Image (tube, grey):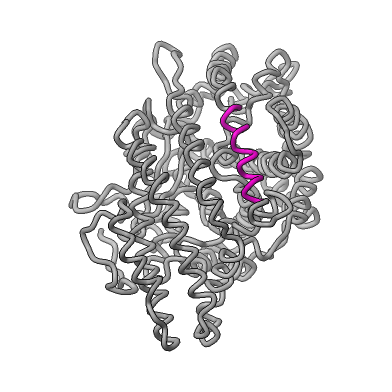
Amino acid sequence: MALAPFQRASDFVPEGLDFSKWSTLEPLYRELIDRELHCVRCLEALIMDRSELDAAASEAMSTLEIAMTCNTGDERATAAYAEFMAKVKPELNRAAFALNRKIASAPQARDLDPARYGVLLRGIRASVELFREENVTIEARLSELDQEYTRISGAMVVEFAGQTLPLSSLVKFAEDQDRSVRQAAFLAGAERRAADADALNALFEQMIPLRQQMARNAGCPSFADYMFKAKHRFDYTPEHCHAFARGVAEHVTPLLRERMEARRRSLDIETLRPWDALVDVHGRPPLRPFQTADQLMTGVGRMIRRMDPKLGALFDALQDDSGHDRPRCLDLDARPGKAPGGYLAFRERLRLPFIFMNAAGVHRDVDILLHEAGHALHALLTRNEPLLAYRTEVPVEFAEVASTAMELLGHDTYDEFYAPADARRASTTHIETLLGRMAAVAVGDQFQHRLYAKPGIDRHGLGELWLELMHRYGPGFDWSGHEHLERVEWHRILHFFGLPFYFIEYGFAQVAALQIWLSAKRDRAGAIKRYTEALSLGGSRPLPELFAAAGVPFDFGPDQIGRIMSEVRRELAAMD
């Protein structure tokens, strides 16, 4: 099926131009910056024209990033993305500031409908307050360092089981009943990452002072304070993050460690090692839900159609490349040279999302595709929203609700891949994985708060900090004899390098998504209806209102987490 056509906000931006070049973009941005405003309708027209131009520039950047991450060995693609980030992105930042200042200071802004433009204006004014010209160069340098992280990570392969494998493919061996195979695969990946530890430490040690300088330039007391403003976190403070961490320590980690202790007893081993986390404790063979990426795509498509026909039709449209009249929307298979991880990119001129992942044929891939599908559906549900900001600047805390809730809502349709017993097994595994993710968020978020509060922290200090937090919040694995590998495990977290302080969003979203899932246990149709309606709002409402629309409170403290974990404990008992 084809996606329904959408109406552009304006016809200001010509078709068919190369928007990856500043020479193309500059005259259009200059026209907007210099445009005279005589009335509130003039300001509205400026906002709409700016939205379309920003969409064209955003799509150009996304297209270049997609090409680079799909093949990190493509020197031309890498160079094109690097050139955009070095030469075009800084100019876009300057143009954005000029336009933000023009809109924020326009007398006509007082006459804009606050119900429609209030969230937009709040974000624009915050961006104007934070912008500093001297930070444009620093941001470009940080982008170069992050690109080097992507290049180093994408080049990591190991020789294992007679094959040359990207590290993402080693996960399939984590479920092998032969403990020696699990151990060998885990250590092969960890040691390969550790081989580049000096290079990655050196990258990060360059990033820390650059980020701290950005904060000082903007008059912020710390980089954490700078990032809260930059991320437009109007509705919560660092104390909410610390409260989440306390909730994890008091309620999530104890449940997670109970599950891990039960696993240790079932496996009849003295201590639980990190390579024992995924193997089936009853000796059953690993779940292998599919053999090809196409099978994964079609199976997840059936799951979503059963969940909700409207959502299923939208996902089906992403798979329909039969006409070859548009760029592809999915790249799912793992291969050497492909960047690690998974993401959802927005191509905002076409208003087509792109799902990127590294499928290895394991159960986790089903959940990852459901996760990224949640993001894609979120984008498609807002496809007719004329304001780019309300399509792409959805608060991440809620954007991750879209993806994480989609994973959980998929439990009832796991039978598209599994027999009933294996479907229950997959659900149990996923809930335990989610508990582990919540613990990982507490670690990752506290890691960043702590490291940026310690001027001059070096690689040794970073390793010690990581160990301290893992021992407080983590699942309690025994790393004896491999402490040097555990010390650099934080290198796996791409967010620390390219997306600083983008981590707590996952934790808040998991708290909300679990409540949507638990609500669906009582009223599936009602829960999915509220979920879909909330996603359709995009970023047009403040964060607490988006959560309320989905039927969940904006509360991530210990008491709320404790209530949720009590219900989760009962659900796990019913699955066992």
Residue 518 screen position, x and y as percent: 64, 56
In the rendered view, tell whether residue 249 sits above or below residue 484. below
**Front residue of 232 and 301:** 232
Residue 48 screen position, x and y as percent: 38, 74
Report if residue 261 is visible in the image.
no
Main SS, magenta region, reads helix
Count of marks overlaid on the render:
0
Report if residue 8 is visible in the image.
yes
Give left or right: position of 13 versus 482. left
Quadrant housing residue 573 = top right
Give left or right: position of 87 versus 102. left
Instruction: Verify whether residue 30 appears in magenta.
Output: no
| Residue sitting at x 67%, y 40% | 444
| Residue sitting at x 64%, y 53% | 217
| Residue sitting at x 68%, y 44% | 445
Residue stretch rendered in magenta on the structure:
201-215
Quadrant housing residue 49 = bottom left
**Front residue of 518 and 21:** 21
